C-alpha cells in the first residue's frame, strides 16, 4: 500500500482531467502523431489515470506499460473501452528499480501527480536515465505550492506553512522536492538540451465542489503532522472552513504544472 487510496484517486480524476494543460498535451500528441503505434511507460500510474486521460490523442495502436509499487492500485487499473490498446501492469519500486521500468522499446514516458514526491537526487537520476535513452517525457499535475482560498482566513498562512513542511518530508525517495519538483525537472531537462513546453494545470474548485472538504482536511492533517500550527488552531481552522463549504462560500485554487520535455533529433 502506498497511502494513496483508489477511492481518492477516482474522486480526483475528473478534476485532474479538466486541469491538464491542453497546449502541453497537444505537444505530446504532436511529437508522436506520425508513429504507426506508440509504446508508453507510465511511472507511478496508480489505477491508470494518465492512460485514460491521454490515449485518445495518441496513435491508434498503443502499448502501455503501467508501473507502480502499490499492488492494490495496479489491480484496479481500468483501460478505456473501445481503444486498440495493449496494457500491462508492472509492480516496481521506482525508488530502487527505475531503470527496469524504462528498459526495452519505449516511445514516450509519462507520469502524473507524482514528481512532488521525489527527491532531488532521484529526479536527477530520472532525467539522466530518460536522456540516456533519448526519450520524451510528459509529467502532468505536479503540485507547485500555489494555493489560494477565498475567503482568506487569518490562520491560512500558518496552515500552509505546515503543508509546505509536509510536502518536503521523505516519501520513500529521500527528502521530497515537493512544490519545487516540476520547476527543477524543467531546468534539468533544459540543461541537457531538451526542448520543454510547460503550462499550468490548476485545480479550480468552485463552491459546491465535493473535493473541497476532502482536500482541506488533507491540508489540516499535514499541518498537524508537521506540528506547524497548534492543534487547537488547526481544529478551529478546519471547522471554520467547513462552515464556508457548507454555506457554499468557498473557492479554492490549487496550483499544478504540466510539462513535456523532448530530445532533439528523435526518429
Ligand atoms: C498521487 S498518486 C498518482 C497516481 C496516478 N499517476 C494518478 O494521476 O492518478 C502517486 C502514485 O505514486 C505511486 N508511488 C509512490 N511511491 C512509489 C514508488 N516508490 N514506486 C512506484 N510507485 C510509487 C503511488 O503508489 C501512487 O500510485
Image (spheres, rainbow, N blue to C red):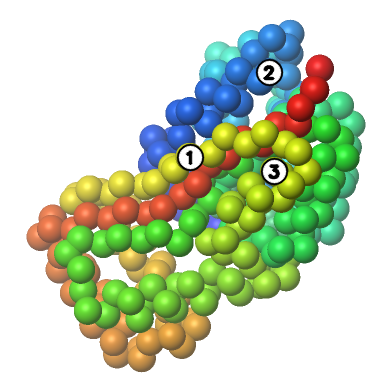
Q: Are marks 2 and 3 in contact (CB under 8 Å)?
A: no
Residue that label 2 marks: 32
| Quarter placement of the C terminus | top right
Q: Is residue 209 above or below residue 177?
A: above
Q: SS for tag 1?
A: strand
Q: Is residue 215 above or below residue 75?
A: below
The image's mark for residue 190 is 3
Q: Is residue 207 above or below residue 179?
A: above
Q: Give the class, few, some or many, for how many residues have Cα within 10 Å of label 1's Cα (few <14, many ≥20).
A: some
Is the residue indicated by label 3 positioned so its CB lies within 8 Å of ligand 1? Answer: no
Side of 261 where 155 appears, left or right: left
Side of 84 where 251 appears, left or right: left
Sooner in the amino-acid sequence: mark 1 or mark 3: 3
Q: Does any portion of residue 83 appear in the rendered image?
A: yes
Q: Which residue is at a point 46% across and 35% down the rendered structure image?
A: 21
Q: SS for tag 3?
A: helix
Residue 125, position as x, y percentages in the image? 81, 54
Q: SS for tag 2?
A: helix
Residue 113, position as x, y percentages in the image? 55, 49
Side of 185 where 211 appears, left or right: left
Q: Which residue is at a point 72% across and 70% down the rendered structure image?
A: 174
Residue that label 1 marks: 199
Amino acid at each position: 500500500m502506498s497511502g494513496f487510496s483508489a477511492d481518492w484517486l477516482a474522486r480526483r480524476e475528473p478534476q485532474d482531467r479538466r486541469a491538464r494543460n491542453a497546449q502541453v498535451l497537444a505537444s505530446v500528441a504532436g511529437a508522436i502523431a506520425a508513429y504507426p503505434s506508440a509504446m508508453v511507460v507510465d511511472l507511478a500510474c496508480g489505477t491508470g489515470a494518465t492512460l485514460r486521460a491521454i490515449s485518445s490523442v495518441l496513435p491508434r495502436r498503443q502499448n502501455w506499460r503501467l508501473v507502480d509499487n502499490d499492488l492494490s492500485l495496479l489491480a484496479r487499473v481500468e483501460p478505456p473501452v473501445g481503444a486498440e490498446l495493449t496494457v500491462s501492469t508492472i509492480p516496481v519500486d521506482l525508488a530502487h528499480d527505475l531503470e527496469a521500468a524504462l528498459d526495452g522499446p519505449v516511445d514516450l514516458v509519462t507520469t502524473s501527480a507524482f514528481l512532488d514526491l521525489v527527491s532531488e537526487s532521484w529526479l536527477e537520476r530520472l532525467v539522466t536515465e530518460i536522456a540516456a535513452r533519448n526519450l520524451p517525457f510528459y509529467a502532468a499535475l505536479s503540485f507547485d505550492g500555489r494555493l489560494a482560498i477565498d475567503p482568506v482566513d487569518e490562520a491560512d498562512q500558518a496552515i500552509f506553512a505546515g503543508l509546505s513542511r509536509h510536502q518536503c518530508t521523505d516519501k520513500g525517495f529521500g527528502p521530497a522536492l515537493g512544490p519545487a519538483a516540476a520547476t527543477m525537472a524543467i531546468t534539468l531537462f533544459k540543461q541537457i538540451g531538451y526542448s520543454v513546453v510547460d503550462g499550468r494545470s490548476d485545480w479550480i474548485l468552485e463552491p459546491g465542489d465535493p473535493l473541497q472538504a476532502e482536500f482541506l482536511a488533507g491540508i489540516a492533517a499535514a499541518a498537524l503532522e508537521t506540528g506547524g500550527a497548534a492543534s487547537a488552531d488547526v481544529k478551529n481552522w478546519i471547522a471554520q472552513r467547513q462552515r464556508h463549504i457548507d454555506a457554499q462560500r468557498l473557492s479554492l485554487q490549487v496550483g499544478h504544472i504540466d510539462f513535456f520535455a523532448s530530445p532533439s533529433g528523435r526518429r
